[in-house]
Image (cartoon, grey):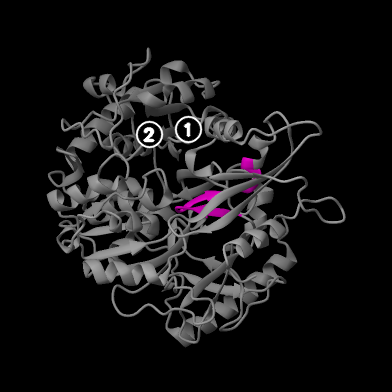
């Protein structure tokens, strides 16, 4: 296959620009693969067996416990045909079973497919049809969503587990009511068995370790293929930058099914032999109680989580005094929030930037010192490229730009994904000879700090979760009486952005907004559902008849008193 001359030319220009930035700002070059080729499973196995791996309410699992239980799950799955390259869908909250299932999958040479437990049956069905999992592991209270979507998966390999396992506290503030046990295979029964582990396949750094779905820069969900090399490289960078070690306790505010939670909480914990503190899902008061009980030392999450913690009247400096480092990413951060948090808790929230396709963080603010704010846009810097990451900014013609010039952020490094699962065309759209086009508009200043100022496309980031308008619009169009639909993001002081929908009705039809909102909630994860639906006589369009979301965005900004 002949290389695309334009792609080669662009990559050469990118490399020259990156070399100039390295020389100017002292950024470290992208390193060639080292002599020691590790996998994420190697990182796990290197941790001391007696060290605590997971603290879950009042339960504790050591690395030896995780190893033993993952052996049993791997043995059970392996004797039922799950092996190298097969996909294992894990649809779980922040529970020990997520960690066990991930390690078990890697012991078989299988690929973890991490999916959001908030997904409904139609969403899961699309993803299952794409990745074709050999096995599925989910919570008992999500069984009615998962099993109908499983399709061709062997029913015996659709396994359920409960959130109340591995602990006895049963905190009703965050844990769901135990549901009726599905008439299917229970993970607890697998753990109680003694199936021998099949011979381990040869796992290499270039094998896919994680398939994580993202809307990326188009509306069709795509599975980012993250190799063990990606997972290990980023985990080691995070371990060193965040100064994680065997005494560190990482509080799991980010979902493990999200790239931040999977990589910076779980795989980085393996790399440091550190402990994860898990509480099923984030609930502010539960988190504050866990801070006092377990005294975590590191946390990374969306800025909305920190806002929620600040909204707790009884939150004090004592809750945060054990933290060595506090980081945020996944959504824009208002400098005023950083200032208010520091004033109240005497702790600094540090900024970061990353994507699923980059295996999480590609830019991090230093652990101390002032983080600059762009005087024009008011944007807080996302930091500087991590060691071994090249980052540049290019214009619409893919020509590298200089300091202060706005364009698309393009990144090269050991965290860049291998591509999108079974989507070569979409892969070619975002990858240029190892350089990832982020779809985010930003710039860097004269001191090498990077900033994000806008999104290249219309993707919405709500509480750190990515929402693609077309997916929501497709659901709305299925509601009786809807003629046109357009979904846009609007600024929100808590979520970063929130989802708004505009619709027009068919002739002689009347849209019941409350019913349409219920319709969306039944078919979409909660963070994708519009918080408001506005009915217009007609939606704005171009001369060719295309609905113009930008016109609606401008209307919202005007109503919110923001500059056009």
> Considering the numbered disc 2 on the image, is that residue within a helix, a strand or a loop?
loop
Q: Residue 84 placed where, x, y %?
A: 44, 34
Q: Is residue 39 visible?
A: no
Q: Is residue 466 magenta?
A: yes
Question: CA gap, disc 2 to disc 1?
Answer: 9 Å
Residue that numbered label 1 is attached to:
86
Q: Mark 1 or mark 2, which is nearer the start of the sequence?
A: 1
Q: Are circles 2 and 1 on residues that touch, CB within 8 Å?
A: yes
Determine whether, in the image, residue 375 is placed left or right of residue 284: right
Q: Which residues are magenta?
A: 459-472
Q: Residue 400 placed where, x, y %?
A: 63, 77
Residue that numbered label 2 is attached to:
108
Q: Is residue 413 magenta?
A: no
Q: Residue at x 52, y 50 (%)?
A: 466
Q: Is the residue 133 above or below the residue 213 in the image? A: above
Q: Is the residue 427 above or below the residue 135 in the image? A: below
Q: Quadrant of the C terminus?
A: bottom right
């Amino acid at each position: 296959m002949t290389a695309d001359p334009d792609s080669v030319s662009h990559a050469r220009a990118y490399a020259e620009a990156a070399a100039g930035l390295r020389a100017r700002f002292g950024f470290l070059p992208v390193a060639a693969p080292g002599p020691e080729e590790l996998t994420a499973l190697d990182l796990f196995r290197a941790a001391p067996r007696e060290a605590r791996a997971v603290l879950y309410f009042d339960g504790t699992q050591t690395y030896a416990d995780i190893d033993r239980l993952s052996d049993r799950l791997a043995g059970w799955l392996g004797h039922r045909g799950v092996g190298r390259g097969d996909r294992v869908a894990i649809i779980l909250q922040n529970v020990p079973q997520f960690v066990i299932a991930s390690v078990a999958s890697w012991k078989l040479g299988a690929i973890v497919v991490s999916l959001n437990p908030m997904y409904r049956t139609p969403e899961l069905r699309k993803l299952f049809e794409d990745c074709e999992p050999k096995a599925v592991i989910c919570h008992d209270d999500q069984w009615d969503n998962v099993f109908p979507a499983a399709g061709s998966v062997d029913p015996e390999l659709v396994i359920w587990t409960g959130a109340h396992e591995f602990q006895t506290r049963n905190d009703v503030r965050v844990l769901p009511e135990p549901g009726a046990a599905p008439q299917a295979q229970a993970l607890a029964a697998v753990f109680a068995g003694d199936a021998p582990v099949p011979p381990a396949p040869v796992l290499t750094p270039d094998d896919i370790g994680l398939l994580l779905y993202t809307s990326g820069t188009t509306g069709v969900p795509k599975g980012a293929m993250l190799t063990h090399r990606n997972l290990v490289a980023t985990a080691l960078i995070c371990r060193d930058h965040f100064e994680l070690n065997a005494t560190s306790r990482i509080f799991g505010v980010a979902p493990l099914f999200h790239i931040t939670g999977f990589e910076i909480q779980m795989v980085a914990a393996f790399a440091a032999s550190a402990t994860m503190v898990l509480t099923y899902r984030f609930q502010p008061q539960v988190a504050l109680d866990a801070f006092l009980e377990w005294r975590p030392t590191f946390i990374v999450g969306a800025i909305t989580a920190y806002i929620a913690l600040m909204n707790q009247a009884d939150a004090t400096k004592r809750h945060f005094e054990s933290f060595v480092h506090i980081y945020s990413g996944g959504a824009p951060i208002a400098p005023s929030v950083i200032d208010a948090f520091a004033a109240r808790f005497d702790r600094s929230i540090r900024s970061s930037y990353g994507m699923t396709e980059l295996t999480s963080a590609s830019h991090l603010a230093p652990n101390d010192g002032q983080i600059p704010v762009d005087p024009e846009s008011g944007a807080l810097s996302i930091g500087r490229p991590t060691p071994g990451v090249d980052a540049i900014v290019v214009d619409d013609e893919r020509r590298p730009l200089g300091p202060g010039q706005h364009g698309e952020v393009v990144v090269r490094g050991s965290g860049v994904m291998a591509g999108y699962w079974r989507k070569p065309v979409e892969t070619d759209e975002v990858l240029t000879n190892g350089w990832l086009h982020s779809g985010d508009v930003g710039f860097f200043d004269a001191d090498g700090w990077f900033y994000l100022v806008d999104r290249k496309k219309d993707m919405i980031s709500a509480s750190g979760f990515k929402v693609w308008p077309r997916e929501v619009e497709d659901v709305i169009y299925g509601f009786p009486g809807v003629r046109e639909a357009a979904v846009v993001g609007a600024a929100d002081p808590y979520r970063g952005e929130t989802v708004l929908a505009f619709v027009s009705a068919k002739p002689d039809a009347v849209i019941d907004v409350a019913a349409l909102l219920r319709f969306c909630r039944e078919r979409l994860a909660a963070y994708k559902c519009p918080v408001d639906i506005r009915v217009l006589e007609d939606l704005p369009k171009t001369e060719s008849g295309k609905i113009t979301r930008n016109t609606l965005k401008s209307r919202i900004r005007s109503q919110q008193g923001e500059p056009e």
